[in-house]
Image (cartoon, grey):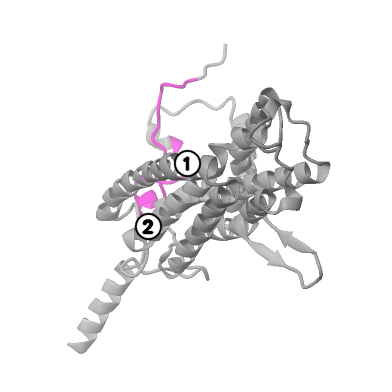
Amino acid sequence: MMTGKAEEKGTADKDDYTQDGTVDLKGRPILRSKTGRWNACSFIVGYEAFERMAFYGIASNLVVYLTKKLHEGTVTSSNNVTNWVGTVWMTPILGAYIADAYLGRFWTFISASVLYVTVLRMHSDSFVNVQGMSLLTLAVSVPSLRPPSCGPAIKEEECDKDASALQIGIFYLALYIIAAGTGGTKPNISTMGADQFDDFEPKERAQKLSFFNWWMFSHLLRDTIRNHILIYVQDNVGWALGYGLPTLGLALSVLVFLVGTPFYRHKVPSGSPFTRIAQVLLASIRKWKLPVPTDPKELYEFSLEQYAESKKFRIDHSTFLRFTRP
């Protein structure tokens, strides 16, 4: 009788593990009841609200700072902002590749966050090594790192007090460090949120849709704070406080994310996607002249039952994108 109960308990414990291949940070199978779902995603949504507020608090008013404080022309400042924004949206391609192929989403995210916000101080007379948002805040706060003001009586376009090469270099260095940091955080935070829900468990699969609803709500919260608070502070109070608040918000967002570490589920890196692409192309070339089976089930490597047992998703056969040889 006791043996039966023990076996029943063992079976229940086995069923409580996630079935989608997620593991803990040490690569071990992970319990569904103690991890993932909203226990984990509440921290991820909290991070996103603060981080996007910080990023767009910098980006939204950047042209104004370049024209009024760095004394750049309107065309030049607009081009520089466009180049920077383009870089911000290109670096996630590299960040996603590194996460999927090698480091995993969590460690790629953590590495990028260090680059994004951390301040490292060396014990010497004047050397301070700063990164990302912290460097940007110093660039608009420390008098020696920002160009002198021409005063309210002179129009900005007529100001002859140009920024030095050092001041411009430090400011743009900070911007592009931020671009590199977002490359590791932007593509991995939302997908990591999706990883917290097991697609093989119906209730969790439904909860995933709710997660993305709250995800978009955090974006609405970000826009409200940015438009009504941060831009007002930058224009009417000062750039040091206007950039300092987003930096503080970003540091807080990373802290919120780290607090949720014990609850996260992790997908194992799957290797370079280019290898699998090459395998598909090679197989297509080798099987170029083989006749197409009349039964779509014969197109798959495994049977439907084997796919279900291995917890792998099968791509359904479609006739919409057919290619026929002339």
Q: Quadrant of the C terminus?
A: top right
Q: Which residue is mark 1?
A: 232
Q: Nearer the viewer, residue 166 or 69?
A: 69
Residue 322 pos. (x, y %): 47, 20
Q: Which residue is mark 2?
A: 41
Residue type of the residue flagged with mark 2? Cys
Residue 144 pos. (x, y %): 76, 52
The stretch in magenta equals 299-322
Name the secondary structure under disc 2: helix
Question: Of the residues under marks 2 and 1, which one precedes in the sequence?
Answer: 2
Left or right position of 39 against 237: left
Q: CA distance from mark 2 to mark 1?
A: 31 Å
Left or right position of 62 against 314: right
Whether residue 244 is visible, yes or no, is yes
Q: Nearer the viewer, residue 66 or 55?
A: 66
Residue 314 within the segment the image draws in magenta: yes
Q: Residues within 10 Å of mark 2 (few under 14, many from 20)?
A: many
